[in-house]
Amino acid sequence: MLYGYGGNILRIDLTSGSVSTEPTDPKIAEKFLGGRGFGIYFLFTELPRGADPMGPDNLLIISPGPLSGTLVPGAGKLDITCKSPLTGGYAGANVGGLLTAEIKYAGYDSIILKGKAPKPVYIFVDNDKVEIRDASDLWGKGSLETEKILKDRLGEEFQIATIGPGGENGVKFACITHDFGRQAGRGGVGAVMGSKNVKAIAVRGNKSIPVADVQAFRKAARAMYKACKDSSGLQVWQRYGTAGVTTWSNEIGAFPTRNFSSGQLEGYENLSGEVMREKIVITDKGCFGCPSPCGKWSHVKKHGVRVEGPEYESTALLGGDCALTDIQDVAYANYLADDLGLDSISAGNVIAFAMECYERGILTDKDTGGIRLTFGNAEAVFAMLKKIAYREGIGAILAEGVKHASGVFGKGSEAFAIQAKGMEFSGYESHNAPSMLLSYMTCDVGAHHNRSWAITYDIQTGRDAVTPDKAARVIYLQHVRPLFDALGACRLQWVELGLDLNLYVPTIAALTGLDRSWDDLLKISERIWNLTRLFWFREVPGFGRAWDMPPARFYKEPVVSGPTKGKVMALEDVERLLDMYYEQRGWDANGWPTPQKLEELGLSEFAAAV
Amino acid sequence: MATVELMGILREHAKAGPEQLGPAEGKTVADVIQALGLPADLVAFVMVNGRQRPKTYVIQSEDHVILIPLIGGG
């Protein structure tokens, strides 16, 4: 008996229409846990080398983890892995909501899609009954409308993930949406789903998850809930969610503003969590088993829509980076991104980048189709989101991401194309935060904060300091935070409520029947991290150190305003940080894991395939 | 009388306890943070009577001010 797991891997070949299942391999579960661990394991071992990310050979691997759907607080996270059309490397996106529990209850630890359906379809999963159903009538509809139609058609208990026009049209940063406003956002997972002609996935399950020691598990999980309930952070996080960060981020000069040229937006007070709560929030909205629901369901009267959010990241990129200062405009842009099926982080970035190009004269009215693409122009943001989703005019270039767009626009714009590995930065301006910048440089999907969020470490240890402990902190976080994505649970109970990580150890042991220490679990996370690194080397010709470097803006152009005005890192300091990081990771000067490190992690056989 | 409470690692970083501050009424939150010897950037949230306020907020009589750090991130 494989305790803590659904027990099966579901495979769907969209080209042939065949469906099969196989038991989950206990050895793989022990070595890679689940969630993003299963994602990279199957991607690495089954994707043909050099496969076109938008071609039928790419895999879309949807995996809950062992904690998903259990009594553990925040047990509602789902990983979606594929080869990224945005970066050409590894994509692992994570979404909350209720779908991960439903997949687990249907008895699956991964759903692996490959091939391409001859016409638009949706995947129907009702426990053991799996069908590929016609979705011709849904193609072209928004993500949110599609979910509503399928809910009405199939029943409220089905949990559904959809793509919007962005995914259908192959926007390289298209997302997958679930629960009317939760996204597997980054890396273009929605574009891959669209390339397979899959509009939606609907799942219902009502089986049980086997637990090794039910009494011990209940006791351990209840202790975790109690700790969450007693947390001093609960009142602020529940009231504001991630939007509570906006004020602080501006105060410390970390709020991406005008394409990361500044860290503080004039008028940011109008985007604060308190203003959002007072002006637009209707109620709180949480994921499966959440004791601290950070989602906010909002009514945007000015634009006549309802939307989940905006979360901090959407406010940072669609708001600050594009210099919008009305929370209702930001919320509407968030709604458009959701319904069109675009990652709001990348979308905000590419629009801010285009705005800077326009203000510098690199783009003209002729290029934009007459849109005055100036910072602060909310109507221009709304219009550009639609142009990108439907690949109209300049939108077709921006739909490829900021790295590609800067290559097309030229004229020095590469320096302010804010990306690493081809993925746009998320919401922390990092000119004066070496740990945070290193987090973006070395993140395994591209410039994203979810693997390591280290800016408070910079604050505690000195924001100008470039020291080995900063690399150590980033590595530590890159093992702890993604571990949650392998376990299929939310990290925010630890991050926001201060839940003691040691409480997870007896809980996981009671669930799985495997006695593992926290260090044992971190070693698995390190194994996963290094396997994703090998995947990059295998799939991206010439991959290495240069892919870990930030754009020149961070080491050549000082911050123009705000509390960090004038700050910029020296290029040699950026290089030094990377050297420290590689050395501490056991990687060589080009970022290759050394044979000794691979041996230590049990990955030598995988390296042989690279 | 207004009260000030510190959460998490702010207790370790503070050079003085809130009880040593004297009356907080009439001071800004930023003044109080400085008087406690705290790095202002470590204070992520200022909650006053259950509402988030900026550090420029002037503390009123009977206010309950909670200073909360942010360590793990979003």
Image: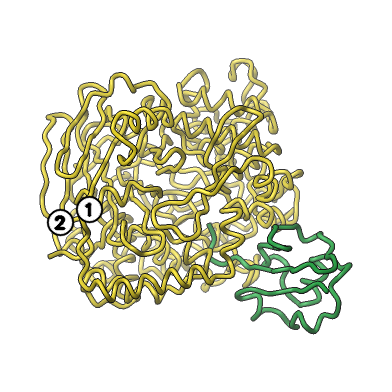
Chain colours: A yellow, B green
**Is residue B48 rendered to the left or right of residue A333?**
right
- The residue at the point 47 percent across, 64 percent down is A493
Q: Which of marks 1 and 2 is nearer the N terminus?
A: 2
Q: Which amino acid does label 1 sit on?
A: Asp
- The residue at the point 28 percent across, 19 percent down is A136
From this view, report whether residue A598 is shown above or below residue A53: below
From this view, report whether residue A518 is shown above or below residue A406: below
Residue A518 in the image: state x and y as whole percent. 35, 75
Q: Is mark 1 on a helix, strand or loop?
A: strand
The chain carrying label 1 is A
Nearest to the observer: residue A492 or residue A462: A492
> Where is the N terminus of chain A found, in terms of image quarters?
bottom left
Nearest to the observer: residue B56 or residue A458: B56
Outermost residue, right side? B26
Residue A265 in the image: state x and y as whole percent. 72, 45
The image quadrant that residue A173 belongs to is top left
Question: In the rendered structure, are the residues bearing label 1 and label 2 in contact, judged by CB atoms less than 8 Å apart?
Answer: yes
Identify the disc placed on residue A109: 1
Residue A411 in the image: state x and y as whole percent. 59, 31
The chain carrying label 2 is A
Q: What residue type is labelled 2?
A: Thr
Identify the disc placed on residue A24: 2
Q: How many marks?
A: 2
Give the distance between the C-alpha atoms of the residues marked 1 and 2, in whole angstroms.
Answer: 7 Å
Nearest to the observer: residue A256 or residue A4: A4
**Is residue A196 rendered to the left or right of residue A364?**
left
**Is residue A550 rendered to the left or right of residue A70?**
right
Residue A590 in the image: state x and y as whole percent. 38, 58
Q: Is mark 2 on a helix, strand or loop?
A: loop
